[in-house]
Amino acid sequence: MSWEDTHPHVSPLYAGLHCRCPRCGEGPLYDGLLQVAERCKVCDLDLQKADSGDGPAVFIILILGAVVVLFALLLESWVEPPIWVHLAIWPVVIIAGAVAMLRPAKALLIALQFKNKAEDTGSLDHDEPQ
């Protein structure tokens, strides 16, 4: 009997946005800032095979870059601050935004890999060791 037969389905969107285990939706996905835990503390799912690659980072860079450039241009055209104001504001916004967006984006991609059984990428086992 598999986990899915005995437990309710967890939405990848829920698991991703809350940075939770893709199988049970309860255990934390991360041990550190962006370090994926070895195993889920609730359902004991092996998370070592979870790999989101560079996909989330690419999307975050493109989206955050466009937003920051837009706001930097708007600030420059409306207020015309000295260059040091830009140098003080935008690095902080970029770093904080990237970290805040990267955790759920990476978790969402891992949850989608689990849901879609991405076997060819070395995905997570759904039924524990075979």
Image: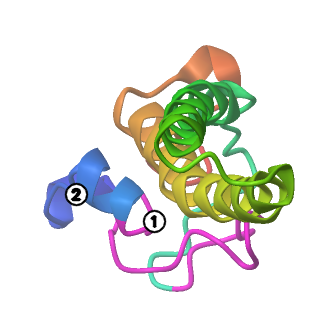
Relative placement, left or right, of 118 versus 2 is right
* Magenta part of the chain: 18-41
Q: Callout 2, which amino acid?
A: Val
* Residue drawn at 65 percent across, 52 percent down: 98
Q: Check residue 10 in the rendering and tell me which mark sits there, or answer none.
A: 2
* Residue drawn at 70 percent across, 62 percent down: 89
Residue farthest to the bottom? Answer: 41
Quadrant showing the N terminus: bottom left
Where in the figure is residue 93, as x and y percent of width and height?
64, 60
Residue marked by disc 1: 21
Helix, strand or loop at label 2? It is loop
Residues at marks 1 and 2 touching, judged by CB atoms closer than 8 Å: yes
Where in the figure is residue 96, as x and y percent of width and height?
65, 65
Where in the figure is residue 85, as x and y percent of width and height?
76, 61
Residue 99 part of the magenta-drawn span = no
User: Mark 1: few, some, or many residues within 10 Å (few <14, many ≥20)?
Assistant: many
First in residue order: circle 1 vs circle 2: 2
- Examine the rendering and report whether any part of residue 47 can be seen: no
